[in-house]
Amino acid sequence: MVFFPLEKIHLLYDGYQKAFQVGRLNLLLIQSDGTPYLIENRCPHMDVALTTATQLPGNKLRCRAHGIEFELESGRPQGPLANTLDCLKKYPISFDGNVLGIELDAN
Ligand code: FES
């Protein structure tokens, strides 16, 4: 496994939201209620990037395209289309000293 650094921990704050490209992965790093989340930067509804999605109270993220909300903790969509959509794709966060990132296979 190879560690890919994304951000220094002290630069995170509630409301932080930034997109990263790591190889072929398009990622979105978010901090909400003191917890960092690393998700695929793609809405499961119609594949729109979530870079400008709105963070909501209760660890939720609202896609700007059509307003669907997702729970960050579980990744589950909310609302009437919830049963027809996939969850947000989440990635485990790794740490190396004071840096947060992602570990991926070297291949
Ligand atoms: S593309 Fe995100 S809600 Fe439709």
Image (cartoon, rainbow, N blue to C red):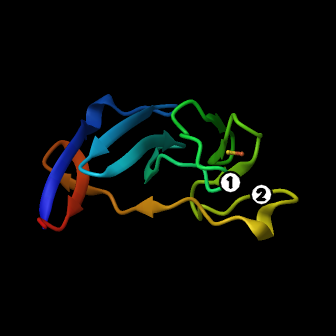
Q: Is mark 1 within 8 Å of ligand 1?
A: yes
For this rendering, which residue is in front, 82 or 37?
Answer: 82
- The x and y percentages for residue 64 are 69, 34
Q: Is residue 22 left or right of residue 31?
A: left
Q: Secondary structure at mark 1?
A: loop
- The x and y percentages for residue 7 are 26, 37
- The x and y percentages for residue 35 are 46, 49
For this rendering, which residue is in front, 42 or 30?
Answer: 42
Which residue is under mark 2?
Answer: 78
The residue located at (25%, 41%) in the rendering is: 6
The residue located at (61%, 35%) in the rendering is: 53
* Quadrant (top left/top right/bottom left/bottom right) for the C terminus: bottom left
The residue located at (48%, 46%) in the rendering is: 41
- The x and y percentages for residue 29 are 41, 42
Q: Is residue 9 left or right of residue 43?
A: left
Query: Quick check: marks 2 and 1 in contact, CB under 8 Å?
Result: no
Which residue is under mark 1?
Answer: 45
C-alpha span from label 2 to label 1: 12 Å
In this picture, is 22 found above or below 14?
A: below
The amino acid pointed to by label 2 is: Gln
* Quadrant (top left/top right/bottom left/bottom right) for the N terminus: bottom left
Q: Is residue 97 left or right of residue 65?
A: left
The residue located at (64%, 33%) in the rendering is: 54
